[in-house]
Image: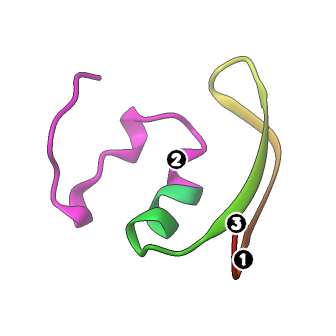
């Protein structure tokens, strides 16, 4: 996918990495978080953790 601007409610998660739908909204809300994603290949998430934190 080539770089392009989108409205916040029109982010095309179906064309992005599989984990983006989990953490990207937190980033847009300026929340601090830590996460772990284990992939099989490039498209399948086998397991993940994602937690909001007070500091990084």
The image shows residue 43, relative to residue 34, as above or below, that is above
How far apart in space, not on screen, are marks 1 and 2 (Cα)?
18 Å
Is disc 3 placed on a helix, strand or loop? loop
- Left or right: 7, with 36 as reference point: left
Badge 2 crowding class, 10 Å Cα cut-off, few under 14, some 14 to 19, many 20 or more, is some
Magenta region, residue range: 1-22
Q: Earlier in the sequence, mark 1 or mark 2?
A: 2
- Whether residues under marks 1 and 3 lie with C-beta atoms below 8 angstroms apart, the answer is yes
Q: Residue at x 29, y 23 (%)?
A: 1
Q: Position of residue 40 (x, y in %)?
A: 79, 23
Q: Is residue 34 above or below residue 11?
A: below
User: Could you tell me residue 4's position as x and y percent?
Assistant: 16, 36
- Report which quarter residue 41 is drawn in: top right
Expressed as whole percent of the image width and height from the top left, the position of residue 51 reads 75, 70
Q: Nearer the viewer, mark 1 or mark 3?
A: 3
Q: Which residue is mark 3?
A: 56
Distance, label 2 to label 3, CA atoms, is 19 Å
Q: How is the image coloured?
A: rainbow
What's the residue at 72%, 77% (across, down)?
A: 53
Residue at x 53% of width, y 75% of height = 31
Q: Quadrant where the C terminus lies?
A: bottom right
């Amino acid at each position: 996918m080539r770089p392009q601007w989108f409205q916040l409610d029109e982010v095309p998660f179906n064309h992005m990495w599989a984990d983006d739908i989990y953490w990207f909204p937190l980033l847009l809300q300026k929340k601090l978080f830590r996460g772990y994603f284990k992939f099989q290949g490039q498209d399948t998430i086998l397991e993940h953790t994602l937690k909001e934190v007070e500091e990084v």
